[in-house]
Image (cartoon, helix red, strand yellow):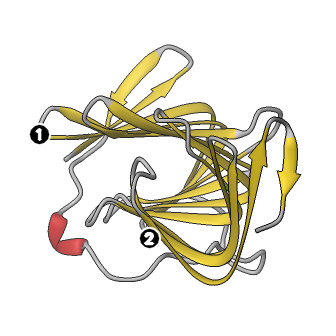
Amino acid sequence: MTMMVTLAGMSLLGPRISDAAEGKGSPDIPSSSMPGPDTSIERVRMTEMQMGKRLWEVEADKADVFEDRGIAILTRVVHPVRIVIYNGEETLISLAEKAVVNLRTKDLQLFGHVRSESSQGTKVFSEVLNWSAGNHQISTDAPVVVEKEGYQIRGKGMVADTILERMTIRGRIASQITLSGKREQP
């Protein structure tokens, strides 16, 4: 796997990070008491490639790289952080206030007003979404809203495939159906 970072028109290929470094769980965002980032970058675009195919792309106003922790924290300054996850010809486009990229596992964590839409039109809204590069799944333990073609499902916790075609809402499920612009409660 190779990561490409684009800075204001320049492309830099970073070193390959060993797959042996892959671990379980997600990195925590560094607290203010921790040392600052090793590198800070403005207007960053990261692309993850796997066997010559794009796995994901992330664009952000700012990125802080913490090499010892193996993470990059991308944040909104003016524009939301934009994440595109690829699954063949299908995509999932997400916007968030912040994203954490695990540079070892290539997993992504999205935080703050997360809005995602698949190329098939399914939308997901939550405060936190996680994407696992290992199993190509989206998940959250937070409250979630899913919308598609007049249906709205609310719940707490979700696991879904990358393009939101198959998903499981874990609990507190409520739904609404919109017919001819009127909301109906089931």
Question: Label 1 sits on what residue type?
Answer: Met
- Viewer-nearest residue: 147 or 40: 147
Q: Which residue is mark 1?
A: 51
Q: Which residue is more in the foreground, 1 or 153? A: 153
Q: CA distance from mark 2 to mark 1?
A: 26 Å
Q: Which residue is mark 2?
A: 68
Amino acid bearing label 2: Asp
Report the side of 21 relative to 96 (left or right): left
Q: Residue at x 76, y 68 (%)?
A: 186
Question: Judging from the image, what secondary structure is the residue with disc 1 in?
Answer: loop
| Residue at x 44% of width, y 17% of height | 10
88, 61: nearer the viewer: 88
- Of the residues under marks 2 and 1, which one precedes in the sequence? 1
Q: Residue at x 16, y 73 (%)?
A: 20
Task: Kindly tell me whether residue 143 is visible in this rendering.
Answer: no
Label 2 sits on a secondary structure element that is loop
The residue furthest right is 182
